[in-house]
Image (cartoon, rainbow, N blue to C red):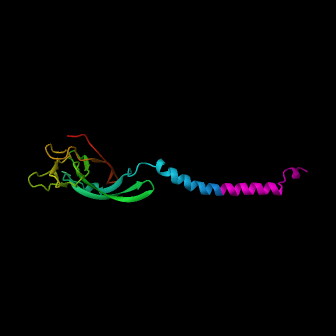
């Protein structure tokens, strides 16, 4: 008698089955759409993760250029962007990692290539100059110091993050 109470009719069985299968299919269709719509909004800002660039042993007191790549996400498109940094160690052992992008109009600066002004960063486009620490030399076109990369050292490797602007000279 109690068996009859818990019996599921054919109609109920069909209802449960169709609701379950329908719900499962709807979820399968909706999830990718929701993910497509919200995923980029919920993720971190592009290019914020730190990238291994060099062995710390390679870093000396003379600025050296290191090239590396960072993953960039532009909404739903992922790519790798080439980057460079001028890296050196101060006498106190502090690591300085400078962006090579000139703050005047965006050319690439080089270290110690202007014979008249040795031991400076030099931008050949409009003769912009920067001191070793990236400070722009007054009277030359750049109006701000070179950006500095955030960095960390882990297991003997130098990792660089974002290049951030500094105060103007
Ligand atoms: S772009 Fe570097 S000085 Fe103009």
The C terminus, quarter of image: top left
* Residue at image coords 13%, 44%: 139
Q: Magenta stretch: give its range.
A: 1-24
Q: Nearer the viewer, residue 103 or 146?
A: 103
Quarter assignment of residue 30: bottom right
Does residue 151 show up?
no
What secondary structure characterizes most of the magenta part? Answer: helix
**x, y percent for residue 55:** 29, 57
| Residue 58 horizontal/vertical position (percent) | 25, 57
Image coords of residue 2 (percent x, y): 88, 50
Residue most extreme to the left: 116
Q: Residue at point 26% right, 51% down?
A: 99
Residue 13 falls left or right of residue 46: right
Asked if the magenta segment contains residue 9, the reply would be yes
Q: Is residue 42 left or right of residue 121?
A: right
Nearer-the-camera pick, 38 or 165: 38
Q: Was residue 162 drawn as part of the magenta stretch in this picture?
A: no
């Amino acid at each position: 008698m109690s068996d009859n109470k818990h019996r599921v009719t054919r109609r109920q069985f069909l209802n449960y089955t169709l609701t379950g299968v329908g719900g499962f299919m709807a979820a399968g269709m909706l999830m990718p759409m929701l993910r497509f719509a919200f995923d980029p909004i919920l993720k971190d800002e592009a290019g914020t993760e730190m990238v291994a660039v060099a062995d710390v042993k390679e870093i000396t007191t003379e600025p050296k250029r290191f090239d590396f790549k960072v993953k960039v996400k532009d909404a739903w498109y992922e790519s790798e962007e080439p980057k460079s940094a001028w890296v050196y160690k101060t006498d106190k052992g502090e690591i300085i990692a400078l962006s090579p992008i000139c703050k005047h109009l965006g050319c690439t600066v080089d270290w110690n290539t202007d014979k008249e002004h040795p031991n400076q960063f030099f931008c050949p486009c409009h003769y912009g100059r920067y001191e070793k620490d990236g400070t722009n030399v007054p009277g030359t076109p750049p109006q701000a110091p070179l950006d500095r990369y955030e960095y960390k050292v882990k297991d003997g490797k130098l990792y660089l993050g974002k290049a951030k602007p500094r105060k103007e000279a």
